[in-house]
Image (cartoon, rainbow, N blue to C red):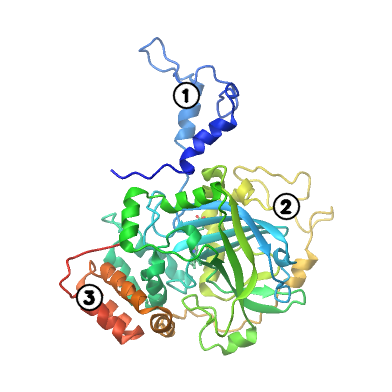
Amino acid sequence: MVTPARDTAADQLLEYSKEHPEGDEESVTTTFGIPIGEKDASLTVGYHGPILLQDWQLIDELSHFSRERIPERVVHAKGAGAFGYFEVTHDITQYTAATVFSHIGKKTPIAVRFSQVAGELGYPDTVRDLRGFAIKFYTEDGIWDLVGNNQPVFFVKDCILFPSFIHTVKRNPKTHLRPDYDMFWDFITLRQESTHTAMIMFSDRGIPASYRRMHGYGANTFAFVNAEGKFNYCKFHYLTNQGIQNLTSEQAQKIAGIDPDFHTRDLYNAIASGDYPSWNFYIQIMTPEQAAKSPYDPFDDTKVWLHADYPLIPVGKLVLNRNPKSYFAEVEQIGFNVAHLIPGIEPSPDRMLQGRLFNYGDTHRYRLGTNNLQLPVNSPFKVASYSRDGENTIHSQGGTPNYHPNSFKGPDNDKRASALAPILPISGDAKRIDSGNDDNYTQPRLLYQRVLKPEERGTLIQNIVSWLRPANAVLQDRAVAMFSKVDLDLGARIREQLHSLTPHHVVL
Ligand code: HEM
């Protein structure tokens, strides 16, 4: 049997023990802090007698244990987190008045969580999937959450399609198996706006070698507002300083068998040994005038903004230099919410973003409870709201009035936030407009013909074929037709390999 070598993470308990000299142990207590005289025995009547109901020590232990797990994230369940800082290296105050960017050299504490999208909590790290890359900025104006992925685009562009898409990459509800190749290809070929993201997922970047060796992208379009109230649209990019490195499908499969926590271990060990990963942070800016004339929809998250037209503007860097003190308290309970935007950063009409603005807070109320924002890892530095009480209230606001308006000096409108709220002219008929067929092939074609090197095209095709082979024949034909719309050569090569006589071989 192959087992992972001992590493820094494996020494965690030894380190703890070294930090606590012999004889320094604390007395063990119940969860309510009462010292315990005998930790390892239940209270029985005689040696073989039944356990007494008055054994509050046992009841405390068992009842807490049955409640140890909370619902896992409905997506992005498997992940790892770390802490560090964001430092401004370039002035972008001409675009935004957000205090996090107020001057060069400014440092803001951050928390980051990396994840896979589809697998559950125990799923192997090295699967072919998108990776989440979410950042929580603890700014003086409260929390700003930038909840991105390691791809600049996403499978669908209307939030109403998100649950259906996610169902196709999760377990089949009858067989409880995943991947279910028919579900996946059926959806992808019926909603061909997913072509672009699918192609990146099947490219070499579909399985990063580690969380440290991948880029991150906000993907959705946001807006910036500057001190004069002028707004521009923007996208966020964070590029790894460790260099991009990926795994082949074969490498990834082997690693999944030996060390399912490969990415988590890599991140923990790098930080524990002082090798702090960092990413340079960039923005792209599009003026409202440019947006109105853009040949592609700037609010469509299946498309990138071409760098030639909208170059990356350097802003700062992200550095991760602390591992979580407790995985559960600081990573499992962290809640990133796309609606957490600080003055100077606003949403755009991006339909995915609009749905996300609602969904994250909603899922946190279910997953973490009404007062999830009072958990230390999620807690903004100061809150002066008119909301009160609810399950697990920790912070109260004392005698501050709990209704607004009031005549008793309760918190009132913030002048700066009010000045920075942009006025958006909006008009149109309320209507359900399917946006799925809005030029789904030009950008994937650029990716295939201009961005990928010949050998990278080869692996892309191999990876697509290995996922298509287990799908039924109708779906295989539909997929070949879809990829042929991107590029005839791409479609032909997929068809040829699909029908070649190589043995049936599926690589994830
Ligand atoms: C309408 C579209 C979307 C919906 C409804 C949605 C919904 C969700 C939900 C419910 C969660 C679980 C959150 C939790 O339990 O804390 C989640 C997590 C996440 N989503 Fe989305 N999502 C959408 C699109 C996207 C897109 C486009 C991206 C990337 C650009 C993204 C990135 C993430 C990340 C990184 C996480 C994990 C956050 C963490 O580490 O805790 N999602 N999403």
**In the image, is 26 to the left or to the right of 498?**
right
Question: Is the CB of the residue bearing disc 3 within 8 angstroms of ligand 1?
Answer: no
Inspect the image, locate mark 2, and give the three-letter code of the amino acid beneath it. Answer: Lys
Structural crowding at the residue carrying mark 2, measured as other residues with C-alpha within 10 Å and reported as few (<14), some (14–19) or many (≥20): few
Q: Which residue is mark 1?
A: 58
Q: Secondary structure at mark 2?
A: loop
Structural crowding at the residue carrying mark 3, measured as other residues with C-alpha within 10 Å and reported as few (<14), some (14–19) or many (≥20): some
At 21% from the left and 70% from the top, the residue drawn is 472
Whichever of labels 2 and 1 marks the residue nearer the N terminus, that label is 1
Inspect the image, locate mark 1, and give the three-letter code of the amino acid beneath it. Answer: Leu
Q: CA distance from mark 2 to mark 1?
A: 39 Å
Q: Secondary structure at mark 3?
A: helix
Q: Which mark is residue 382?
A: 2
Residue at the limit of the structure toward the top, as seen here: 46
Label 2 with label 3: CB-CB less than 8 Å = no
Q: Which tag is nearer the camera, tag 3 or tag 1?
A: 3
Whichever of labels 3 and 1 marks the residue nearer the N terminus, that label is 1
Vertical placement of 287 versus 248: above or below?
A: below
Label 2 with label 1: CB-CB less than 8 Å = no
Q: Which mark is residue 368?
A: none
Q: CA distance from mark 3 to mark 1?
A: 62 Å
Q: Secondary structure at mark 1?
A: helix
- In percent of width and height, residue 225 lies at 70, 74
Question: Is the CB of the residue bearing disc 1 within 8 angstroms of ligand 1?
Answer: no
Q: CA distance from mark 2 to mark 3?
A: 59 Å
Inspect the image, locate mark 3, and give the three-letter code of the amino acid beneath it. Answer: Gln
Q: Which residue is mark 3?
A: 497
- In percent of width and height, residue 496 lies at 21, 79
Q: Which tag is nearer the camera, tag 2 or tag 3?
A: 3
**In the image, is 464 to the left or to the right of 68?**
left
Q: Quadrant of the N terminus?
A: top left
